[in-house]
Structures are given as C-alpha cells and as structure tokens.
C-alpha cells in the first residue's frame, strides 16, 4: 500500500495516520431504485488491480475526509484531494 | 447533597519526575507539565471565510496562543483558567462566524526542550521537524508513536505537545523513554 499520502492540508504523512473507508467511485442510487441496486451499493465491492479511488480519513491529523487516487499494483499515488467539493473550510 | 466532593487533580500529578537516562550535560532534554489553564477548540461556521485574524482576538495575547489544527479549526490555549463569563465573552467576539468548544478539561500541554529535541520527537512522528519547514509558531497534528498529539514549535530548541488528557501520562512516559540517550529532567511543577 502507498506509504506516504500527501494530505492537501498537512503535507506528506505516513499511512498510519489515516483510516481507509473504501471505494470513492460508487454512486448512491435513488431512494426508489429497488432492492438489487441498494444491495449492490451497500454490500458489493470490486477488488481492482490498478488505478483506484478511495475515501481516506486523516484521523490523526486534520481529521478531513480525502479522496486518494492510487494504484493498487504499483503503489503510486496519483492525486489526493479534499472530499468536500468546496475544498476550503467546510 | 453531594456524596463526594469533586477534586481537581492535574492529569500529570502522578507522573514520574526526576532525572533519567544518560548523565550528559550538553544536550539534556527538559520535560515540563504546563498549567492546565484553558484549551478552546474553535470551529469555523460553514462559508465563514478567512477567520485567522478574528480567532487571534480570543487568544490571551501569548505568542503561540492560537494553533492551527485543520481547515477551519484552531486551538486557542493559555495558562489562565477561564470562567463561564470569560468564555461567553470570547464566543460573542466570534459573532457566530465560529463556535468554541471548551476542551480545557480534555487536553493537556507538555513542554519539551533541549538541543536534541528534534531528534527525540523524530523518533515518534514522521513530520519534518527541521526549522526550515517547521518554523517557530507552526503547529502540526500528528501521531507520536500511537498517540495523537498537536506539536507546536515555541523556539529553536523547544516544542509544546498537546495531547488528550487520558493519554497524557502514557505520552509522558514515552517522551522520557525517547529522551534517555540524551538524558532527561522531568518536572510536573505540582
């Protein structure tokens, strides 16, 4: 796993300071989308080999949610951004 | 009628004190428990813009009273205890652009200094502590070992570490352990 994450607020920090939440690419279905869509949204996850987007929480730092785009094969981190669309103070 | 009188006891009252480790004199580390005055957690309201100068107004005027924590969040610290009236006076200054959560009971400050202080703290954190990037007055929330702490540089050879009260004694023991090779003098002043 990538060992240094460049937090946009704190700078490069070791992965031990973060908590990984999981896939950031899945979209929440509409409220009436049906059982299958909701089952997939809640339970089903891919296990990608390669480029992957995830939510990471900087638990022991600024406590912001980040979106980390990384490669599960090469450990390269492509981008790290604040999960809020504003990107500034929430 | 109260069955037990509440007694305020400082978090590090029972922590170990004295001199430990190497008997060197040149680069000894000094560890000091700071007064449990006030620690205010200031949180910006949504869309409140730049608040740095506003937050500075609720500090006690000390040089490192305001410590950046994360986006829109600060800790305002000082040695003097605050009354409820003091606190509501400070909240009024922020004019609803930010809120104050009183953490005076919840977080403890420890001063650590000495010529080798960077080497000591570097054993616990991955943050670059070199003065070129971690300037005097700069703060960083990070892990020291497994304990989350806010590190603030207060001088070329001095830092303050702020930690959750329940972890204070554990971190205190860790800091002594990390300082043994240089020799350390620990005092809680109580």
Image (spheres, coloured by chain):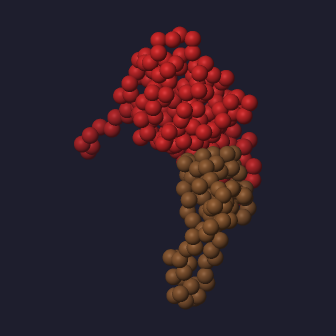
Chain colours: A brown, B red
User: Which quadrant is the C terminus of chain B positioned in?
Assistant: top left
Residue pictured at 64% horizontal, 30% vertical? B153
Of B13 and B103, the residue lying toward us: B13
> Could you say where residue B87 lies in the image, as x and y percent from the top left?
56, 42
Q: Is A78 positioned to the left or the right of B33 in the image?
A: right
| Viewer-nearest residue: B166 or B124 | B124
Whether residue B97 is situated above or below residue A26 in the rendered picture? above
Left or right, A83 with respect to B16, comes to: right
Residue visible at 62% across and 33% down?
B152
Residue at 58 percent of width and 32 percent of height: B122
Image coordinates of residue B63 in percent, x first then y, are 67, 29
Which quadrant of the figure has residue A54? bottom right
Marker count (numbered) = 0
Tell me where residue A66 appears, x and y as whole percent. Answer: 65, 58
Q: Quadrant of the N terminus of chain B?
A: top left
Q: Where's residue B52, x and y in %?
A: 72, 43
Position above or below: A4 against A55: above
Work out whether residue B114 can be spotted: yes
Q: Nearer the viewer, residue A7 or B61?
A: A7
Q: Looking at this view, is B11 or A21 the one in front?
A: A21
User: Does residue B90 appear in the picture of this structure?
Assistant: no
Horizontally, residue B97 falls left or right of residue B82, namely right
Residue at point 49%, 35% (across, down) = B108
């Amino acid at each position: 796993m990538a060992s240094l994450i460049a937090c946009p607020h704190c700078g490069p920090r070791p992965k031990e300071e973060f908590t990984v939440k999981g896939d950031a690419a899945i979209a929440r279905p509409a409220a009436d989308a049906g059982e299958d869509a909701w089952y997939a949204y809640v339970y089903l996850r891919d296990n990608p080999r390669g480029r992957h987007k995830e939510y990471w929480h900087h638990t022991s730092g600024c406590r912001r949610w980040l979106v980390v785009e990384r490669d599960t094969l090469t450990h390269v981190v492509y981008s790290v951004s604040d999960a809020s669309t504003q990107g500034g103070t929430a | 009628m109260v069955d037990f009188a509440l007694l305020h006891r400082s978090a590090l009252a029972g922590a170990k004190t004295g001199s430990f480790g190497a008997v060197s004199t040149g680069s000894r580390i000094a560890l000091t428990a700071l007064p449990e005055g006030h620690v205010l957690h200031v949180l910006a309201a949504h869309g409140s813009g730049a608040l740095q100068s506003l937050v500075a107004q609720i500090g006690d005027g000390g040089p490192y009273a305001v410590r950046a924590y994360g986006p829109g969040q600060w800790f305002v610290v000082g040695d003097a205890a605050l009354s409820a009236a003091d606190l509501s006076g400070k909240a009024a200054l922020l004019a609803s652009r930010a809120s104050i959560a009183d953490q005076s009971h919840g977080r403890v400050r420890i001063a650590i200094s000495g010529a080798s202080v960077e080497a000591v703290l570097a054993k616990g954190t991955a943050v670059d502590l070199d003065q070129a990037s971690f300037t005097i007055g700069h703060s960083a929330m990070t892990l020291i070992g497994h304990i989350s702490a806010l590190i603030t540089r207060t001088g070329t050879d001095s830092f303050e570490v702020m930690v959750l009260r329940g972890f204070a004694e554990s971190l205190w023991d860790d800091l002594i352990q990390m300082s043994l090779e240089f020799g350390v003098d620990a005092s809680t002043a109580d």
